Amino acid sequence: MSGNRETEFARRLAAAARQEQFLTVVSREEAQAAFRAAVPHAALPPETVPLAQSLGRVLARDIASPIDVPPFDRALVDGFALRAADTEGANADRPRTLALNREILACGVAPTLALAGGTATPIATGGVMPRGADAVIMVEQTEFFEEGLAIEVSAPVRPGQFVGYAGADMASGETVLRRGTVVTAREIGMLAACGLADIEVLRRPRVAVLSTGDELVAPGEALRPGAIYDSNGAIVAASVAENGGDPLPLGIVRDDEAALEGALRDALSRSDLVVLSGGTSKGAGDVSHRILSRLGEPGILVHGVALKPGKPLCLAVAEGKAVVVLPGFPTSAMFTFHDFVVPLVRALAGLPPREEEAVTARLPQRLTSELGRTEFVMASLARGPDGLVALPLPKGSGSVTAFSQADGFFAVPAARAGLEAGETVSVVRLGAGVRPPDLTIIGSHCVGLDRVVGLLAERGFRARTVWVGSAGGLVALRRGECDLAAMHLLDPETGGYNTPFLEEGMALGPGWRRLQGVVFRAGDPRFEGRTAEAAVAAALADPDSVMVNRNAGSGTRLLVDGLIGTGRPPGFWNQPRSHNAVAAAVAQGRADWGVAIESVARAYALGFLPLAQEHYDFAYRVEDRMKPALAAFLSLLGRPETDAALTELGFEPAGDEA
């Protein structure tokens, strides 16, 4: 055996003396360019997996919620459902007495009794709000009266208090997760809340991992004299998994040309990418370059890169798959692995480039906090004029989307009652690969915008959308917190949409037209066959007719205010933040009418009486017009593929309108 080894060693020395292979050193940039030109750094095809197996996977398509979450208006605390108007003026000296209805709304119990004025219904956290109720009071803030047949309320309750509206978290048809999102526990929670059992994800790249060298011994085996344990194989396999790939450890291959060629051919047949460590240097142990030259075209791309450490790196392509031969020394191997292999693995898996775990960002507005308690604030990141901006997310603790939409969180110390606008915070990232969006859009939600954002993603730009209403979007744009304000604001004086609200230095990107109207349950004689104005007049004259309103600051609220004037009909203080919540309230019988867009009415099988063709547009700062992501978004407006997508959803593209 000793003689055979000496003979093999002598043969390799002779090969080196004949200079069978020399390193042709190129720059790092040249090597990367050659590698990317020969090997597509693109995501692999999708596959469908059970929800329980989707952890760590990358979504292959946008996911829209098939239902409203929550699917009904619900109580956020244990207490009593009531009408806020019944508590006006209540104080400790003059409490309001409310009779208790003979119904207890536990979780999962559908209400059977409508709530009349002067009454209250016991309700548990998560219970369905009964018809007629617009607020919940905590049980701790009441006193039982008349042997438990009534309660006393000693403080006024505001409309909407402790009520979570239908679709407030996720609206039916709303895009809740984007293609390219990495599925973590929080995304699994969202998908489960939507009722989805199977998820379409990108296939993970299978990465064959081999080590070569007669001196290598697998961990756990006895270490013979002159040998070392193979650490590269374990490190590379772990790094592959850490970056979204499925490692296929194929063990150690001895320094034998036939054995190594057989192992490489086997690896190519079983994987998407092959990583071999060892056997790249100009010394006698190098046989891999000869094998790679005959495995298939184009063969070796680069053999030698101007790196320290990492000069002997070898990059090749065989059978359409990348083969990367790393240097044998662990430091060199891992340096070159992270510089060349990690970007490819992450690209094949559909993952973004790796980023740091924490960043500093500016807080754009004052944030209050409870003194004496450390508060962790979920935040999304946006690019402001002076660097990163940390935008606290508005959704509360009952929301499953707040965690998903967050890029990270920052802490407000217990000794402080809040943070001031302009302060710098350290945002701790939630998961590897999270990065600020290329474009931040704040304002009014529309499923049409979801589709346009998807088209933008196909052009390589990531957009973050935050729904706070049209007026809130304009305020955010003014403060520099976003790139676009999505809006549909009607000026009652001029009858014009959006343009009258622009400030100096702002411009408007024309979006599309949405038909707003009165929604009602089909067959209701108060609405069926009438004009919208006549139907609303009839509803206002009927004391048993319950409306569902919209939140102040929304474009729809301005339309509603114009319809009802100064009146405050039953249900006025029920003010959800979306068209879906309005439709859900009517469809489920908690209200009789409201104002929403036609596409939502169709989705809920509701009657619809047209009111106005509103303009849904986008305000932006003129000075930002040529920023790549903003310019790409604006260029999509009016394009044939965009118009076709909007028309399919039931909207009318604005074309070249200003």
Image (spheres, helix red, strand yellow):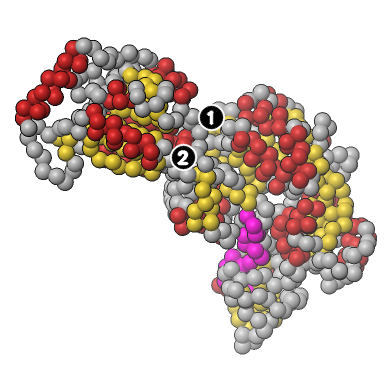
Name the secondary structure under disc 1.
strand
Specify whether residue 95 is painted magenta: no
Residue 547 can be seen, yes or no: yes
Name the residue rendered at 23%, 12% in the picture: 19
Asked whether, in this view, residue 249 is left or right of residue 487, the answer is left
* Quadrant in which the C terminus is drawn: top right
Between residue 616 and residue 282, name the one nearer to us.
282
Horizontal and vertical percent position of residue 657 = 83, 32
Q: Residue at x 58, y 45 (%)?
A: 61
Separation of disc 2 and disc 1 at Cα? 30 Å
User: Does 403 sit above or below residue 332?
Assistant: below
Of the residues under marks 2 and 1, which one precedes in the sequence? 2
Of residue 345 and residue 353, the one placed in the foreground of this image is 345
Q: Which quadrant of the rendered structure holds the N terminus? A: top left
- The percent position of residue 389, horizontal first and vertical second, equals 55, 36
Q: Amino acid at mark 1?
A: Gly
Residue depicted at 90% across the width and 62% down the height = 535
Closer mark to the observer between disc 2 and disc 1: 2
Q: Nearer the viewer, residue 410 or 654?
A: 654
**Magenta residues?**
65-80
- Residue 77 on the magenta span: yes
Please give left or right for residue 214 compared with residue 550 in the image. left
Disc 2, SS: loop
Quarter of image, res 222:
top left
Residue 387 position, x and y percent, is 53, 29
Q: Position of residue 304 (x, y in %)?
A: 32, 18
On residue 387, which mark appears?
1
The correct choice, above or below, for 427 with respect to 118 in the image is: above
Q: Which residue is mark 2?
A: 349
